[in-house]
Amino acid sequence: MSLEKRRALVRLANQFDVLILEDGPYRFLRYEGTTLPPVKVFDTEGRVVFLGSMSKILSPSLRLGWLIADPEIMAGIEALKGAADVESSALIQRAVSQYLSRVDFPAHLAQLRKTYRQKRDVMLDALHCHLPADFTITDPQGGFFLWLQGPKGLDMTALQREVLLPAHVSVVAGRNLSPAHSMVSGARLTFAAPAIGDIEPGVQRLAAALSQGARQVQAR
């Protein structure tokens, strides 16, 4: 989202009296391009709630995050939190606090960016080399994911069930990522979890399964 769109979003929220929930777990994982300020920076009426998470930048198992909100909104969130699970783990909070006080966290983030950038580049190279001609892929500047777009008429959910999973390939079908279930022919891929040496073999299996699936769809 461009800088002007971020400002415009806040103006619209002010005009129509709505809240904005800004989920920024990948904010520290930009690999190139310009880092833009969060929408929260342009908040003039206390209606933007910003969320962050340690699970993307320290350990997936932590399930520990933070939020920045107007005091009135924060009071309501605290009440909801207390009703939901009383409190987050004190042990995990203390462990993260000790880690942050003893470790050069900016250096840790720099290492994360270097590692994930390398994984992204390996996956992109493999996809450009092996992907069938009627599929396209995005080149993200940050985060964990690539977007795979298939040809019009392809049902990625059915393809995953019938072809990808039997080939031991897992993607997140686009139908599950849109409120109206409209992104039928796309899928989300991640480069974060696999080891670098496993990425190209995985992409080769994916590409072979996509080719097989596309032929099946055309044959129907």
Image (cartoon, grey):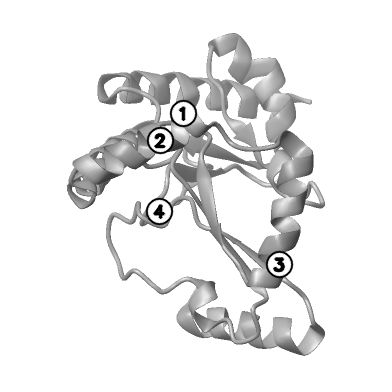
Toward the viewer: 70 or 193? 70
The amino acid type found where label 3 is placed reads Ile
Residue 73 — which label? 3
Three-letter amino acid code at the position of disc 1: Leu
Q: Quadrant of residue 155?
A: top right
Q: Which residue is mark 4?
A: 140
Q: Residue at left 68%, top 47%?
A: 152
Labels 3 & 2 near each other (Cβ < 8 A)? no
Circle 2 residues within 10 Å: few <14, some 14–19, many ≥20:
few
Assess disc 3: are there few (<14), some (14-19) or many (≥20) residues with their C-alpha within 10 Å of its C-alpha.
some
Q: CA distance from mark 1 to mark 4?
A: 35 Å
Query: Callout 4, which amino acid?
Result: Pro
Q: Does 171 appear above or below 176? A: above
Q: Label 1's element?
A: helix
Q: Which tag, 3 or 1, sits closer to the chain's start?
A: 3
For residue 91, which numbered disc appears in the image? 1
Circle on res. 94: 2
Q: Are marks 1 and 2 in contact (CB under 8 Å)?
A: yes
- The CA distance from mark 3 to mark 2 is 26 Å
Relative vertical location of residue 76 with respect to residue 183 in this rendering, above or below? below
Q: Quadrant of residue 43?
A: bottom right
| Amino acid carrying mark 2 in the image | Arg
Q: Which mark sits nearer the N-terminus, 3 or 2?
A: 3
For the residues marked 2 and 4, what is the alpha-carbon distance in whole angstroms?
Answer: 34 Å
Q: Residue 71: image x %, image y %?
A: 64, 70
Mark 4 or mark 3: which is in front?
Answer: 3
Q: Residue at x 37, y 42 (%)?
A: 57
